[in-house]
Amino acid sequence: MSQKERHVADLFSGGRLIAVPRKAARRAQLLAHLTETLFEEGRTYTEPEVNDALRTVHEDCSALRRHLITSGLLTRTRDGGSYRRAEAVDSALAGASAIPGTSPAA
């Protein structure tokens, strides 16, 4: 397991996110991991679907959703009511390994 993977793994206990890191670099690693494991590329999600997916790891789904939007990993559709995994990050995420005990979106 790489150091980056250990950093992300250390943020979880029993499959649940303990806290969102304050440091931008660690938060970016976490958000990339969440994007890869919770959201399929090319699929459109409603806001309740995004919230439900994020709630599987942390109760504050609103904060996580905002972080994903501001980091550019999740984008709102033009109508503002749906979300998609950002295409621009798919290539960057392709090389990232999943944290043991989690499975990437299929």
Image (cartoon, rainbow, N blue to C red):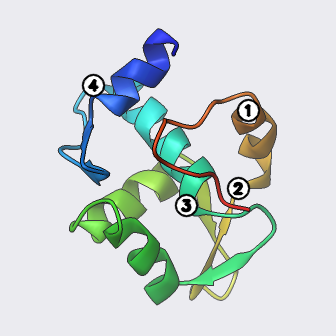
Mark toward the viewer: 3 or 4 = 3
- Mark 1 in CB contact with mark 2 (< 8 angstroms): no
* Mark 3 or mark 2: whose residue is earlier in sequence: 3
Q: Residues within 10 Å of mark 2 (few under 14, many from 20)?
A: some
Residue visible at 47% across and 54% down in the picture? 68
Q: Mark number for residue 86? A: 2
State the separation of the CA atoms marked 4 and 1.
20 Å
Q: Quadrant of residue 60?
A: bottom left
Instruction: Tell me the CA gap for discs 3 and 4.
Output: 22 Å
Mark 1 lies on a secondary structure that is helix
Q: Quadrant of residue 75?
A: bottom right
What SS does tag 2 mark?
A: loop
Tell me: residue 32, above or below residue 34. above
- Quadrant location of the C terminus? bottom right
Which is more foreground, mark 4 or mark 1? 1
Q: Residue at x 44, y 88 (%)?
A: 48
What's under tag 3, amino acid-wise?
Answer: Leu
Instruction: Say whether disc 3 or disc 4 marks the residue closer to the N-terminus.
Output: 4
Cα distance, mark 1 to mark 2? 11 Å
Residues marked 4 and 1 touching at CB (< 8 Å): no
* Nearest to the observer: residue 53 or residue 77: 53
Residue 12: x and y in percent read: 27, 41
Q: Residue at x 18, y 43 (%)?
A: 19
**Distance of label 1 from label 3 (alpha carbons):** 16 Å
Q: Could you give the CA–CA distance between mark 4 and mark 2, rounded to whole angstroms?
A: 22 Å
**For mark 4, what is the residue?**
23
Q: Is residue 86 left or right of residue 63?
A: right
Q: Residues within 10 Å of mark 4 (few under 14, many from 20)?
A: few
- Could you say which is closer to the camera, residue 53 or residue 82? 53
Badge 3 is on which residue? Answer: 38
The amino acid at mark 1 is Ala
